[in-house]
Image (spheres, rainbow, N blue to C red):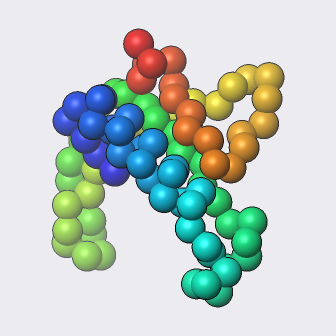
C-alpha cells in the first residue's frame, strides 16, 4: 500500500493487524495459526506502469522495520526508523 500521509499508513496498519488477528482463518480454509507481519517505511516512491497488467505500479526501497535483536513475530506492526521519525 502507498499512502501520502504517514499517519494514515499507521492507522491502516493497526486496523489491518486487528482484522487479521480477529479473523477465524479456519473458516476460510487456512490454518488457525495464519497471521500477518506488517512493516511500515517512509521514503521516496516512484510510480510507473506494470508491463503485464498495464496498471499503476509503485516501487521504492523498503527496508522492513525489523528489530536487529529479535525475530519478527506474526500479529505485530513494525516500523523503520525513517517511518518512526
Taking depth in this image into account, of 18 and 9 the one nearest to the observer is: 18
Residue 66 drawn at (x, y percent):
64, 31
Give me the residue at 51% from left, 25% from top.
80
Relative to 7, residue 39 above or below: below
Viewed as shown, does residue 12 lie left or right of 56? right
**Rendered location of residue 79, percent (x, y):** 51, 29
Q: Quadrant of residue 78?
A: top right
Q: Position of residue 54 (x, y in %)?
A: 19, 72
Residue at left 62%, top 75%? 25
Residue 77 in view of the camera:
yes
22 versus 52 height, above or below: above
24 sits to left or right of 11: right
Q: Residue at x 25, y 76 (%)?
A: 53
Q: Nearer the viewer, residue 17 or 9?
A: 17
Indicate whether 47 appears above or below 85: below
Quarter assignment of residue 51: bottom left
Counting labels gives 0
| Left or right of 46 in this view: 17 | right
In the picture shown, does residue 80 fall above or below 16? above
Residue 82, given in percent of the width and then of the height, sits at: 43, 19
Quadrant, the C terminus: top left
In the image, 54 versus 68, the foreground residue is 68
Q: Is residue 11 left or right of residue 62?
A: left
Residue 59 visible in image:
no
Q: Residue at x 55, y 38 (%)?
A: 77
Residue at the top extreme, as displayed? 85
Amino acid at each position: 500500500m502507498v499512502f501520502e500521509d504517514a499517519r494514515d499508513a499507521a492507522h491502516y496498519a493497526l486496523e489491518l493487524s486487528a482484522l487479521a488477528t480477529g479473523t477465524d482463518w479456519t473458516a476460510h480454509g487456512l490454518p488457525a495459526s495464519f497471521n500477518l507481519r506488517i512493516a511500515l517505511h517512509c521514503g521516496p516512491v516512484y510510480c510507473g506502469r506494470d508491463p503485464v497488467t498495464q496498471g499503476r505500479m509503485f516501487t521504492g526501497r523498503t527496508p522492513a522495520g525489523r528489530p536487529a535483536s529479535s525475530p519478527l513475530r506474526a500479529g505485530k506492526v513494525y516500523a523503520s526508523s525513517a517511518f518512526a521519525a
